[in-house]
Amino acid sequence: MQTLFEEALKRKNIRFQKNVKTADLCTFRIGGACRYLIEPQCIGELVESILLCEHTRVPYEVIGRGSNLLFADAFIPIALIRTTALNGLVVQNGELIAACGISLPRLAQKAAALGFFDLAFACGIPGTLGGGVYMNAGAHGSDLASLVKWVDVLHPQTGEIRTLFNKELSFSYRNSIFQQENIVALRACLALRCPSELDKIQAQMHALLNRRQATQPVSLPSAGSVFKRINNGASMGKIIDELGLKGMRCGNAAVSQKHAGFIVNLGGAKAADVCTLIDCIKGIVKRKKGIDATTEIRFLGFEKSQPGT
Ligand SMILES: Cc1cc2nc3c(=O)[nH]c(=O)nc-3n(C[C@H](O)[C@H](O)[C@H](O)COP(=O)(O)OP(=O)(O)OC[C@H]3O[C@@H](n4cnc5c(N)ncnc54)[C@H](O)[C@@H]3O)c2cc1C
């Protein structure tokens, strides 16, 4: 079956590699390897890659920039379909229609150049639009849910492509329909509503990026905030800090000294170290504060129950 799969990819001219290090596919720089890395160069190839996996029963996951992912240390016998080459962008009547692989900072810059403030919040979120709608990524009091007008989605099992409008996307804090249903975001339309002057937008984005530099461990590999806010309120980073857990370490994974909500890879950390640290933090937070912490990051390639569950 594997040979058939590889031959079909070659016939369709879809780029792929075998046995690729997953640490190279995520911002945590942690992980073993995956069986295939497929890199579609257009949305048609993305759809074809997914349908081919379905038809040949090759297990797969669609990923973006891997900025919210922890890959397992073990070999993952699946195909990772990475969307980062899908950068298409069209501007139409104050709306941005973009392919799922475009980076959120690039979209923020584009909106600013068009004279719109709406996406300034996303200038420092290092993910793609597809990963962003999956997570309902947000910062500084805004999130993608407030901008997304519609998303074209693929239903992998039927091959059907449908347009889902905002109300059908079940957006809530760091959550969307993509986490409940097996569908893939192909492209999305963002409605821009807040005109502003370019200088002002750029000054605001500059200030937001400076704030990140000052408050987040941006020079160390991480996957951003590990935990969700408690009932969309109290920040877990603040709670972990109050409990004195900054610097807590397992192997080469550590709770960041700069932002207690981040776990950083000090160099060569293992996924198992990160999971142990997450379990320790969850245990302490439960014992000392009575709070059930849930993880924001996603886990890929783990066999048993995961720290976030
Ligand atoms: C330094 C740092 C700072 C961060 N700051 C923030 C922040 O301020 N706010 C915030 O919300 N997040 C933040 N993040 C987390 C992360 O950047 C976001 O969650 C981002 O939206 C993830 O996008 P991605 O492309 O990297 O997705 P990935 O990590 O590649 O994937 C995340 C999930 O989305 C799914 N997915 C990806 N593409 C698609 C698609 N096309 N269709 C369906 N599912 C898909 C994947 O299967 C996976 O389950 C930060 C991360 C880092 C490292």
Image (cartoon, rainbow, N blue to C red):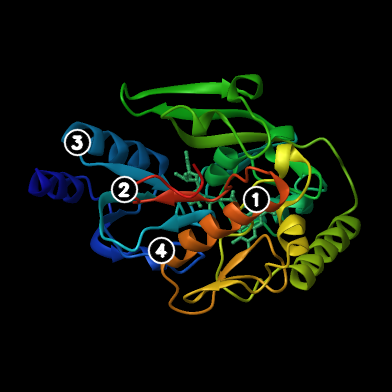
**Tag of residue 303:** 2
Where is mark 3, residue-wise? Answer: 57
Front residue of 206/242: it is 242
Residue that carries the numbered disc 4 in the rendered image: 272
Ranked by sequence position, the earlier of labels 3 and 1 is: 3
Residue 12 coordinates in the image, percent (x, y): 21, 45
**Between marks 3 and 4 in the image, the one whose residue lies nearer the viewer:** 4
User: Residue type at mark 2?
Assistant: Glu
At 31% from the left and 38% from the top, the residue drawn is 50
Identify whether 29 is placed above or below 181: below
Separation of marks 2 and 4 at Cα, in angstroms? 12 Å
Q: How many marks?
A: 4
Q: Position of residue 306 (x, y in %)?
A: 43, 47
The structure residue drawn at horizontal position 53% and vertical position 43%, both measured from the top left corner, is 130
Determine whether the beta carbon of the residue marked 4 sits less than 8 angstroms from the nearest atom of ligand 1: no
Q: Is mark 1 within 8 Å of ligand 1?
A: no
Disc 3/disc 4 C-alpha distance (Å): 29 Å
Query: Mark 2 or mark 1: which comes first in sequence?
Result: 1
41 left or right, relative to 166: left
Which residue is under mark 1?
287
